[in-house]
Image: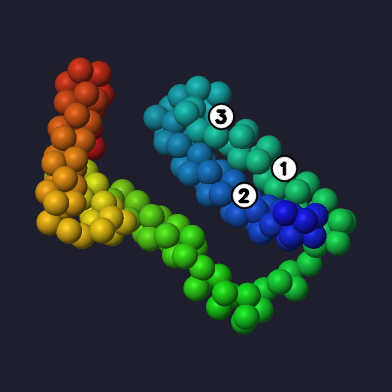
Amino acid sequence: MEKRNLRRADLVTSIIVFAFSVFVFISAIGLMSNTLEKGKEWYVSAGLFPIIISVFLALCAFMLFFRAKKDGARFDFIHKEAVMALLKDREFRVAVIIISLLIIYIFILLPLLPYWLATFIFLYTFMLIFQERTFKNIVIMTIVAVLSTVALTYGFGTLAMIPLP
C-alpha cells in the first residue's frame, strides 16, 4: 500500500481507536464507582487498570492522528463514488455480515437462550450463509454445528469448569 493510502487509513484507525478508548474509559469508571459504593479503596477497583490503558490508548490515537495529518493525510477520500465502491466490495460485505452475526449472538441470542442453543444457532447460521447449500453440505453443517456446540459446552462447562453464559 502506498504511503498516502496508509496515512489515510491511519486517520480512520486513529478515530476508531480513540472511540474505543473512550468506551473502555466510561465502562471502567462504572467499575470504579461500584467499588467505591461498596466502601472499598479506589486502588483495589477492577476498573483501575482499564482506565490507565484507555488513557494511554487515547494518547496513541492522538499521536497517530496528528502524525497522519502531518504527513499530508486528508479526509478527501470520503466521497460518494468511494462509498459506493466500498458498499459493492465483497470483502466489506463479508465483514459486515460477520460483525452483524456476532452482535446478534452476543446481545440477542446469549441473553435469551441457553448457551448451547445460542451457540448452535450462531454456528449453523454462519455456515449456512457462507457455504454452498446442497443437501450434503447442509447435513455436514448440521453435524459440525452439533459436534462443535457439544465440544464447547462440555470442554468449557464441564472439563474446564468455566461458567458459561
Residue 60, label in figure: 1
Residue 60 point in image, percent of width and height: 72, 42
Q: Earlier in the sequence, mark 2 or mark 1?
A: 2
Question: What kind of residue is marked 2?
Answer: Val
Q: Residue furthest bottom?
A: 80
Front residue of 54 and 34:
54
In the image, residue 17 above or below residue 54:
below
Identify the image quadrant of the N terminus: bottom right
In the image, residue 161 above or below residue 97:
above
Count residues near mark 1 (Cα–Cα under 10 Å), then give few for <14, some for 14-19, many for 20+.
some
Front residue of 75 and 93:
93
Q: Which label sits in the foreground, 1 or 3?
A: 1
Q: In this view, does 126 lie to the left or right of 92?
A: left
Q: Name the residue under label 3.
A: 49
Count residues near mark 3 (Cα–Cα under 10 Å), then give few for <14, some for 14-19, many for 20+.
few
Q: Distance between the residues labelled 1 and 3?
A: 17 Å
Determine whether label 2 and label 1 are within 8 Å by CB.
yes
Which residue is at a point 12% across and 49% down the rendered structure image? 139
Determine whether label 2 and label 3 are within 8 Å by CB.
no
Which residue is at a point 72% across and 43% down the rendered structure image? 59
Secondary element at image label 1 = helix
Count residues near mark 2 (Cα–Cα under 10 Å), then give few for <14, some for 14-19, many for 20+.
some
Residue 108, label in figure: none
Question: What kind of residue is marked 3?
Answer: Phe
Q: Distance between the residues labelled 2 and 1?
A: 8 Å
Q: Which of marks 1 and 3 is nearer the N terminus?
A: 3
Determine whether label 1 and label 3 are within 8 Å by CB.
no
Question: What kind of residue is marked 1?
Answer: Cys
